[in-house]
């Protein structure tokens, strides 16, 4: 119970941030067929109940393959795209239609003693995607395989304003009444861009992007992805990464790769500090990073005014050069605008948060919170269990962020022996 309460408390800032945001979520056909699908639906319902505007895009590749096999038809691909001739299109329409109805039915459940109880969702699907044929490429006729031409942004927007979940299939329609088979990744990416979505969530078989050693990569920038896609070749991870990068380049602030096989992966990615998948985010004008020796000069300029006011303890250049590895920084276009330091305390499982400073011109943009989160992550990585802070002027700020009043007696001996009685700093403590 205690873990649940803590999780919910730590999720609260994310709940507030995601309210009224627009998320485009792509679930491939493999995810629809997976045993975890019911849990994914419950997670989507939870997002909707928390005020997220949801557009759900679904795929149908394995379901189409099954129908082709049942009819004795051989799947044909070129450049990893399906060639959709007339018999194949019949299988596509059959598969997509059944999946759409199954999804609408699942989202319409209102069973007692289940996560769906009382949800009363409205789901809408329709001709929101205008498509055009790919045509002939390298002498290969793709027939009814198409690409997205336009998304009905206004129509979808009106439905989202009415708290309706919008369902987009991998089918598109032309102004002449033709039907085209589309890649669900293409539909999701274009929908996210055209709707100016806050997030694009891409479900895949893996937890996210795995490097050459099979380790999960937590964060990537769009400009890093082309080289990865080239290395991955026709791997589906490459397709997801490419879609995520395209969305970010098109103005979507963040794309997330999560696993459809991992129960709760979406919630962990969206409502916890460390997430559970891979985040692809635009290169920011500001970046949060660890300090290097080249930052000492900028660090002195940043903290000097606070030292002169007596808010921070004075640190000489020599001290800063020696302790620079303890600092994390926020850099904005080459200017250091915020900093904080973590000092592990000897012979204990505790650390001290020190020298938290933000340039006065940038004090209302959440940079202090970002630095605090960074310091806490570093502390956990080091195996620390408690974080202390000593302050004379900003007690309320730390209280609001989970620090509790403590005492000099609670400080580990190595830090208590250095306590400055003249400053009379108040001691606060936070369990990690």
Image (cartoon, rainbow, N blue to C red):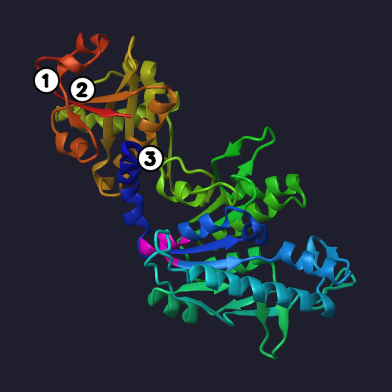
For discs 3 and 2, the disc positioned in front in the rendered view: 2
Q: Considering depth in this image, is 279 or 27 the residue closer to the camera?
A: 27
Magenta: main secondary structure equals helix
- Is 141 situated left or right of 336 in this image? right
Q: Quadrant of residue 373?
A: top left
Question: Which residues, given as a range, are shown in magenta?
Answer: 44-53
State the image coordinates of residue 46 (x, y, percent, origin top left).
Answer: 41, 59
- Mark 1–mark 2 Cα distance, whole angstroms, equals 9 Å
Say if mark 1 contacts mark 2, CB within 8 Å: yes
Q: Which mark is residue 313?
A: 2
- Mark 3–mark 2 Cα distance, whole angstroms, equals 22 Å
Q: Which residue is mark 3?
A: 335
Q: Which residue is mark 1?
A: 423
Q: Which residue is pictured at 19% across the width and 31% down the height?
A: 404
Query: Of the residues under marks 3 and 2, which one precedes in the sequence?
Result: 2
Examine the structure image and report whether residue 332 is included in the region drawn in magenta: no
- Is 322 situated left or right of 421 in this image? right
For discs 3 and 1, the disc positioned in front in the rendered view: 1
State the image coordinates of residue 124 (x, y, percent, origin top left).
Answer: 50, 78
State the image coordinates of residue 183 (x, y, percent, origin top left).
Answer: 69, 67
Quarter of the rendering occupied by the N terminus: top left
Indicate the secondary structure of the residue bearing disc 2.
loop
């Amino acid at each position: 119970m205690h873990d649940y309460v803590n999780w919910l408390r730590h999720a609260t800032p994310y709940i507030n941030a995601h309210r009224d945001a627009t998320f485009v979520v792509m679930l491939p056909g493999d995810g629809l067929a997976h045993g975890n699908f019911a849990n994914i639906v419950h997670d989507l319902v939870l997002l909707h109940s928390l005020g997220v505007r949801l557009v759900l895009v679904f795929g149908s590749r394995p379901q189409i393959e099954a129908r082709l096999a049942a009819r004795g038809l051989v799947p044909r691909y070129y450049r990893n795209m399906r060639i959709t001739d007339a018999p194949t299109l019949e299988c596509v329409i059959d598969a997509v239609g059944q999946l759409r109805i199954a999804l609408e039915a699942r989202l319409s459940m209102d069973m007692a003693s289940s996560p769906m109880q009382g949800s009363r969702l409205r789901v809408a699907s329709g001709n929101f995607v205008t498509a055009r044929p790919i045509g002939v490429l390298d002498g290969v006729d793709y027939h009814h395989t198409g690409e997205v031409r336009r998304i009905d942004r206004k129509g979808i927007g009106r439905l989202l304003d009415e708290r309706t979940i919008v369902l987009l299939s991998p089918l598109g329609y032309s102004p002449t009444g033709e039907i085209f088979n589309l890649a669900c990744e293409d539909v999701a990416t274009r929908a996210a861009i055209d709707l100016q979505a806050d997030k694009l969530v891409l479900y895949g078989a893996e937890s996210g992007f795995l490097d050459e050693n099979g380790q999960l990569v937590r964060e990537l920038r769009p400009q890093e992805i082309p080289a990865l896609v080239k290395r991955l070749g026709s791997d589906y991870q490459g397709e997801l990464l490419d879609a995520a990068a395209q969305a970010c380049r098109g103005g979507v602030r963040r794309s997330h790769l999560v696993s459809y096989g991992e129960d709760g992966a979406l919630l962990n990615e969206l409502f916890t500090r460390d997430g559970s998948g891979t985040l692809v985010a635009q290169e920011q004008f500001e970046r949060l990073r660890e300090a290097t020796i080249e930052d000492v000069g900028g660090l002195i300029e940043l903290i000097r005014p606070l030292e002169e006011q007596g808010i921070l303890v004075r640190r000489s250049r020599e001290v800063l050069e020696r302790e620079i590895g303890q600092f994390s920084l926020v850099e904005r276009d080459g200017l250091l605008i915020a900093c904080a330091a973590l000092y592990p305390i000897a012979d204990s499982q505790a650390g001290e948060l020190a020298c938290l400073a933000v340039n006065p011109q940038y004090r209302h943009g959440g940079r202090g919170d970002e630095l605090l989160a960074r310091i806490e992550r570093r502390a956990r990585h080091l195996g620390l269990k408690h974080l202390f802070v000593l302050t004379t002027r900003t007690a309320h700020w730390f209280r609001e962020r989970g620090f509790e009043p403590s005492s000099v007696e609670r400080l580990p001996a190595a830090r208590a022996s250095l306590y400055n009685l003249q400053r009379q700093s108040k001691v606060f403590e936070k369990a990690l």
